Image (cartoon, grey):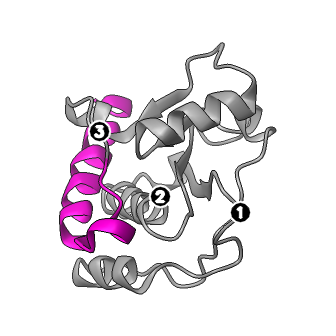
């Protein structure tokens, strides 16, 4: 296992909207709590559609409003080996979770979760690619990431 106690991979369809938003929000939370060294945080896509593309401008703008940079992030594809490499694989919606489990050939260690589970909901994070509401997505991501942080660091 890695040298850091918590290895978290956030996952969405294209890795340009929701999962990078969660990646950078979570990094911001742990850094502001002086615990950045305890975490390895990244994000990935379940599809190939956006691989190599930067974060969506709407996501970058929502993060910038919160004082969070996502500079240098480019979409990458989820790989089968990610199951062994990460402690938690956190999807933004039910479709992401199903796709991950299918790619990994199951979830024997119960590592695949949905982000809003940590905010006390079984709901999905709405995809702003379709809704256009990056601020609402940010609010849900923030709630999920704070819930995840509290779960890991009570």
Q: Where does the magenta region start and end?
A: 125-154
Mark closest to the chain's N terminus, 1 or 3: 1
Question: Can you tell which quarter of the image residue 138 is in?
Answer: bottom left
- Residue for point 46% across, 80% down: 56
Mark 3 vs mark 2, CA separation in Å: 13 Å
Q: Residue at x 35, y 60 (%)?
A: 127
Q: On the image, numbered disc 3 is attached to which residue?
A: 116
Q: Secondary structure at mark 2?
A: helix
Q: Which residue is mark 2?
A: 19
Q: Position of residue 118 (x, y in %)?
A: 29, 33
Magenta highlight: main SS:
helix
Mark 1: secondary structure? loop
Instruction: Confirm or deny contact between disc 1 and disc 2 (CB under 8 A).
Output: no
Q: Is residue 123 above or below residue 36?
A: above
Give the quarter of the figure containing the N terminus: top right
- C-alpha distance separating marks 1 and 3: 24 Å
Which secondary structure lies at badge 3? helix
Graded by Cα atoms within 10 Å as few (under 14), some (14 to 19) or many (20 or more), the crowding at tag 3 reads many
Q: Quadrant of the C terminus?
A: top left
Q: What is the number of callouts on the image?
A: 3
Looking at this view, name the residue that lies furthest to the right: 81
Decide: is 57 above or below 48: below
- From the image, tell me which residue sits under label 1: 48
Residue 139 disc label: none
Which of these two is toward me, 37 or 22? 22
Q: Mark 3–mark 2 contact, CB under 8 Å? A: no
Left of 4 or right of it: where is 96? Answer: left
Marks 1, 3: nearer the viewer: 1
């Amino acid at each position: 296992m890695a040298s850091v106690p918590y290895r978290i991979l956030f996952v969405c369809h294209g890795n340009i909207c929701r999962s990078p938003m969660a990646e950078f929000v979570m990094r911001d939370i742990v850094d502001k709590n002086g615990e950045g060294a305890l975490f390895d945080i990244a994000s990935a896509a379940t599809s190939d559609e956006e691989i190599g593309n930067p974060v969506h401008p709407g996501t970058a703008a929502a993060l910038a409003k919160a004082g969070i940079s996502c500079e240098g992030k480019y979409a990458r594809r989820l790989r089968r080996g990610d199951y062994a490499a990460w402690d938690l694989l956190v999807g933004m919606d039910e479709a992401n979770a199903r796709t991950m489990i299918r790619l990994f050939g199951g979830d024997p260690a119960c590592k695949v979760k949905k982000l809003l589970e940590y905010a006390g909901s079984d709901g999905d994070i709405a995809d702003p690619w379709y809704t256009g509401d990056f601020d609402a997505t940010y609010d849900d991501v923030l709630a999920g990431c704070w819930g995840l942080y509290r779960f890991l660091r009570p």
